[in-house]
C-alpha cells in the first residue's frame, strides 16, 4: 500500500513537471529519503501527507463498509438505487 501511495504521488509530481529532487525539496526531505519511502515497510503518515499536499493531493481515509460510504457521500437514502 505504501509503495502504491508513493508511486501515485511521484506520478502526480511528474504530471506537474516536478522531478523527484524537486518533490523531495518541497516536502522538506532528501531525495534519498524519498527513494527509500517506496521500498520500506514504514513511513510517517505526516511525511506521506506532506508529499501529497506538495502535488495537490489529499490523503483521505474512508470507511470500508458500503453503507458508511453511502452515508458520507449523502447517497444512503438515494431511492434510485433501491431494487423493487
Image (spheres, helix red, strand yellow):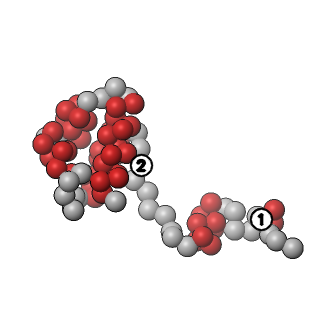
Q: Residue at x 38, y 29 (%)?
A: 16
- Earlier-in-chain disc, 2 versus 1: 2
Left or right: residue 74 versus residue 3 is right
Which of labels 2 and 1 is toward the front?
1
Asked whether the viewer can see residue 68, the reply is yes
Q: Is residue 73 left or right of residue 29?
A: right
Circle 2 SS class: loop
Residue at (23, 35) in percent of width and height: 20
With 9 as the anchor, is 34 left or right in this view?
Answer: left
Instruction: Name the one closer to the observer, 68 or 33.
Output: 33
**Image coordinates for residue 30, horizontal then vertical, percent:** 13, 41
Q: Give x and y (percent) for residue 38.
A: 24, 51
Can residue 26 be seen? no
Q: Which mark is residue 58?
A: 2
Instruction: State the mark number for residue 81.
Output: 1
Q: Are marks 2 and 1 in contact (CB under 8 Å)?
A: no
**Quarter occupied by the N terminus:** bottom left
Residue 45 drawn above or below residue 21: below
Mark 1 is surrounded, within 10 Å at the Cα level, by few (under 14), some (14 to 19) or many (20 or more) other residues, namely few
Residue in the picture at 38% in, 37% down: 12
Q: Which mark is drawn over residue 27? A: none
| Marks 2 and 1, how far apart at CA | 29 Å
- The x, y position of residue 28, in whole percent, is 18, 41
Q: Secondary structure at mark 1?
A: helix
User: Callout 2: 10 Å neighbours few (<14), some, many (20+)?
Assistant: few
Instruction: Give the image location of residue 9, x and y in percent.
Output: 34, 43
Amino acid at each position: 500500500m505504501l509503495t502504491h501511495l508513493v508511486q501515485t504521488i511521484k506520478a502526480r509530481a511528474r504530471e506537474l513537471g516536478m522531478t523527484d529532487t524537486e518533490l523531495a525539496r518541497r516536502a522538506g526531505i532528501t531525495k534519498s529519503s524519498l527513494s527509500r519511502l517506496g521500498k520500506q515497510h514504514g513511513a510517517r503518515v505526516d511525511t506521506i501527507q506532506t508529499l501529497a499536499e506538495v502535488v495537490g493531493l489529499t490523503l483521505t481515509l474512508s470507511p470500508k463498509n458500503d453503507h458508511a460510504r453511502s452515508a458520507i457521500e449523502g447517497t444512503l437514502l438515494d431511492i434510485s438505487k433501491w431494487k423493487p
